[in-house]
């Protein structure tokens, strides 16, 4: 209890303890401090401390720690800033960083007896605490999708079959419901690395046609680490999809993703992925193995923070698929996307417009033997995410039940009738984390 009171006093009265009021103006505790203000005044001690407190109250401990660590470099002799940082590290259960900071502070010769006593109590508390090696979580989701063109029927309801024009008789409007559950286990490896194991199951069912009904199972193993100032995440995946009216499919994959920041506003991410997909050819599907393929994918993204609320994303991508039977299955894809993210206090909104160019390598005689397929697709989507607890706190006190609303419009232009279509879809989903 004594140690808890000291932590509380450090956080609540930190401005009274050490801020030179004749140098730094007193700010109202209720005043909302924006990230833009921090960028404009990175050395303003009072402003930055209030911002750290504000972010801590919102649960954004990463930003709190980042701000306090920067202040410790600007004001290395200020004991109270380090005590504040130490209290946050203990609060979010980061024992390695806390111990390192304690050892650093114990070497100081100007520590007051009270501060030294606080350090010793925290150190003893960390020793008594058995660190949890594994962190377990469960994610559950349900979704409903309504589409006005579920089968990508062409605009004039015509299609090419072996060079002849035929009617596109597939249904257009349909609803799909889906649900999923995943179990994740993570554990730290050293100070800056962690291991992840995830298993998942998803089921999807259409209301009218059932050709695309399926259940899927997946396993993912991954590692998050830091190397040369960059965050790296290699991973390995295996999955199986059971289609109700089609051959089962199997896939294995591996890849690596990277992330780094430049300054306070710019961040870059990149990745490479490899996939090996196979179809289970059987009596009900004698051509499933024709689409067995090896795929390679490359991505590069740039994110820019304009303000605390507004950020943008630019994405580039390239993928190459080589199938067992080349005709109609081998292709290259070039992707480009622009997005804007709005982190309002009442909801998160993401707006994205993406363009994809598909170039096929060999003619498909089942469609047209004299024409090499080439497609262009423009996809516009807008998504809104809201924590149910923001509306009904009694139902979702921890703010981990989310409602997601989204709209997507696809305009596909192709040099063959089959892939020249428009579609609109609306989706409503709920996700819950434990």
Image (cartoon, rainbow, N blue to C red):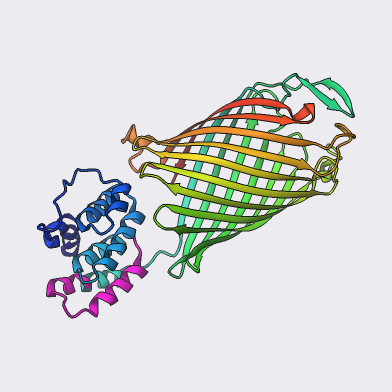
Q: Residue at x 46, y 51 (%)?
A: 137
- Is 408 positioned to the left or the right of 370 in the image? left
Q: Main secondary structure of the magenta part?
A: helix
Query: In the figure, residue 125 lies in which quadrant?
Result: bottom left
**Which stretch appears magenta?**
91-119
- Is 72 positioned to the left or the right of 260 in the image? left
Q: Position of residue 283 (x, y in %)?
A: 86, 39
Q: Residue furthest front?
A: 40
Q: Residue at x 71, y 41 (%)?
A: 242
Q: Position of residue 165 (x, y in %)?
A: 86, 22
For the residue pair 92 and 355, the one nearer the viewer reads as: 355
Q: Residue at x 13, y 51 (%)?
A: 26
Q: Residue at x 87, y 33 (%)?
A: 366
Q: Position of residue 325 (x, y in %)?
A: 85, 46
Query: In the figure, residue 413 lies in which quadrant?
Result: top right
- Is 362 positioned to the left or the right of 249 in the image? right
């Amino acid at each position: 209890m004594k140690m808890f009171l000291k932590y509380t006093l450090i956080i609540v009265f930190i401005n009274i303890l050490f801020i030179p009021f004749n140098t730094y103006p007193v700010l109202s505790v209720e005043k909302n401090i924006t990230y833009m203000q921090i960028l404009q005044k990175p050395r303003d001690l009072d402003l930055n401390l209030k911002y750290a407190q504000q972010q801590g109250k919102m649960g954004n401990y990463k930003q709190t720690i980042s701000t306090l660590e920067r202040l410790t470099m600007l004001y290395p002799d200020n004991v109270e800033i380090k005590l504040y940082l130490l209290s946050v590290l203990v609060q979010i259960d980061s024992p390695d960083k806390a111990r390192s900071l304690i050892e650093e502070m114990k070497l100081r010769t100007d520590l007051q007896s009270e501060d030294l006593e606080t350090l010793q109590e925290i150190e003893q508390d960390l020793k008594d605490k058995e660190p949890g090696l594994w962190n377990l979580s469960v994610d559950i989701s349900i979704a409903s999708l309504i589409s006005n063109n579920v089968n990508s029927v062409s605009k004039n309801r015509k299609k090419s079959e072996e060079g002849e024009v035929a009617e596109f008789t597939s249904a257009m409007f349909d609803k799909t419901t889906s649900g999923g559950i995943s179990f994740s286990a993570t554990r730290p490896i050293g100070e800056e690395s962690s291991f992840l194991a995830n298993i998942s199951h998803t089921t999807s069912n259409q209301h009218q046609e059932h050709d695309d009904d399926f259940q899927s199972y997946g396993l993912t193993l991954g590692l998050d680490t830091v190397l040369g100032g960059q965050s790296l995440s290699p991973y390995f995946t295996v999955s199986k999809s059971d289609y109700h009216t089609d051959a089962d499919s199997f896939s294995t994959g591996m890849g690596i993703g990277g992330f780094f920041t430049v300054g306070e506003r710019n961040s870059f991410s990149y990745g490479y992925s490899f996939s090996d997909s196979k179809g289970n050819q059987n009596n009900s599907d004698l051509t499933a193995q024709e689409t067995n393929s090896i795929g390679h994918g490359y991505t590069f993204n740039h994110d820019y923070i304009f303000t605390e609320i507004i950020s943008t994303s630019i994405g580039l991508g390239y993928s190459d698929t080589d199938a067992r039977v080349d005709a109609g299955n081998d292709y290259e894809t070039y992707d480009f996307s622009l997005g804007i993210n709005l982190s309002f206090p009442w909801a998160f909104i993401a707006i994205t417009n993406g363009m994809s160019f598909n170039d096929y390598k060999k003619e498909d005689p089942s469609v047209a033997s004299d024409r090499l397929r080439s497609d262009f697709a423009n996809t516009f989507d807008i998504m809104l995410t809201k924590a149910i607890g923001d509306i009904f706190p009694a139902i979702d006190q921890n703010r981990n039940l989310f409602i997601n609303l989204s709209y997507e419009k696809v305009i596909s232009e192709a040099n063959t009738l089959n892939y020249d279509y428009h579609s609109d879809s609306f989706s409503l989903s709920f996700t819950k984390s434990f």
